[in-house]
Amino acid sequence: MSLLPENAVRWERLTAPELRALAERGALVVLPVASLEQHGPHLPVWTDSMIGHACCLMAARKAGAEQPVVVLPPMWTGMSEHHLPFGGTITLDYAAFRAVLACVCRSLKAQGFQRLFLVNSHGGNIDPLAVAARELCVEFAMPVVTSTVFHVAGEKLGAVLDTQPGVMHACEAETSFWLHIDPAQVRQEEIAGALSAPATSVSGPFHRFWSFAERAPNTGVMGDPRAATAEKGAWLLEVVSDALAEAMRNQALWQAPQQVWAPR
C-alpha cells in the first residue's frame, strides 16, 4: 500500500494556501477528539490524544492517496470529570465541549470545507459526541460523522490481546500503543503496581455517573498493562487505521444531509 507522507495530511504543518487548495478539492477534515486525563501511574495524561492522533494520521496517509484528507491537531480536552479524583485531568462540561465543536465546524465552513470526521479516543466522549454530531450535521448542513477508534475495528482488536477482549483504560492495549509509538513515555517500573482492585459494577439498561475512583479503585487503571508489548501496539495501530481509512473512503457516509428544517 502506498502511503502519503505524514506532512501531507497534518493540518498544522500546511500553509494557508495549501489548505485553501485542499478545501477546493473537497478534502475530508478529520478531528481527533480526545482528553487530558489520568492513565494510572505508568502512562502520560496525553494517552488518549496520542492514540487518536496516531490512528487518524495513519488512516489519512492510507486513504489520502485516493482522495484528499487532512487531520487537525487533536482536541486535547474532552469530558473527563469521572477521572478528576486521581489528578492530572482537565475536563470540559457538555456546553463547552459542544461549543468548541461548533466553532470548528463554523471555521471549516468559512474556508470552504464541507465534511468533518470526529474520531474519538476517549470513552467519556462517546455519548456527548453522538448527540453533538447529529446537531451539528443539521445546524451546518454538512456531513459530521463520529466514531470511536476502539470500536471501528470490532473484534479484530481482541484477537491480539491476551487479557482483555478490547480496549479498557491504561490497559494492555493502551500501554501497547505507547510501547510501539514512544516507549520512553512508559514508566515501566510502575506497571507491576498499576492494577486496580476489583470494583462492583451494574450492567443492563441503566445509565448513571460513576467516578473512576469507584470503577477502578487505587490506581485508576482498568485492565492489565503487564501483558503489553510494542508488537501488539503496532498491530492495533494497523487494524484501527485500516478501519478508519475504509470509513474515509465510504461515500455513503459523506453524502450531504437532506434539509430538515425549512429556512426562516
Image: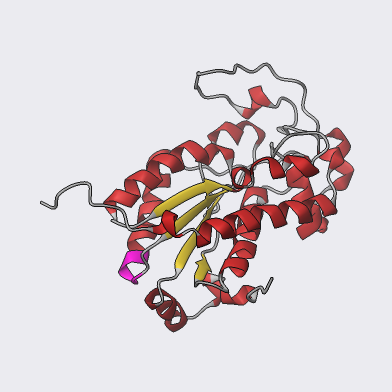
Q: Position of residue 130 (x, y in %)?
A: 43, 41
Q: Is residue 100 left or right of residue 158?
A: left
- Above or below, 222 relative to 60: above
Pick the front one: 258 or 45 = 258
Q: Is residue 119 visible?
A: yes
Whether 58 is drawn above or below 257: the answer is below
Residue 163 drawn at (x, y percent): 81, 34
Residue at coordinates 33% horizontally, 71% vertically from top-left?
112
Q: Residue at x 51, y 41 (%)?
A: 125
Give the image location of residue 1, x and y in percent.
Answer: 69, 70
Is residue 42 in view? no
Which residue is rendered at x = 83% and y = 48% of the image? Answer: 187
Tell me the magenta residue range: 108-112
Q: In this view, does 255 lie to the left or right of 67?
A: left
- Taking the image as shown, residue 211 lies to the left or right of residue 230, namely left
In this view, 17 is above or below 38: below
- Relative depth, front residue between 47 and 236: 236
How many numbered callouts? 0
- Taking 202 as reference, is 199 left or right? right
Q: Going 52% across and 42% down the picture, which residue do you hit?
A: 91
Q: Where is residue 251 in the image (x, y as percent from the top left)?
A: 44, 60
Q: Is the magenta stretch mostly helix, strand or loop?
A: helix
Front-lying residue, 63 or 109: 63
- Determine the residue located farthest toward the bottom in the rendered image: 17
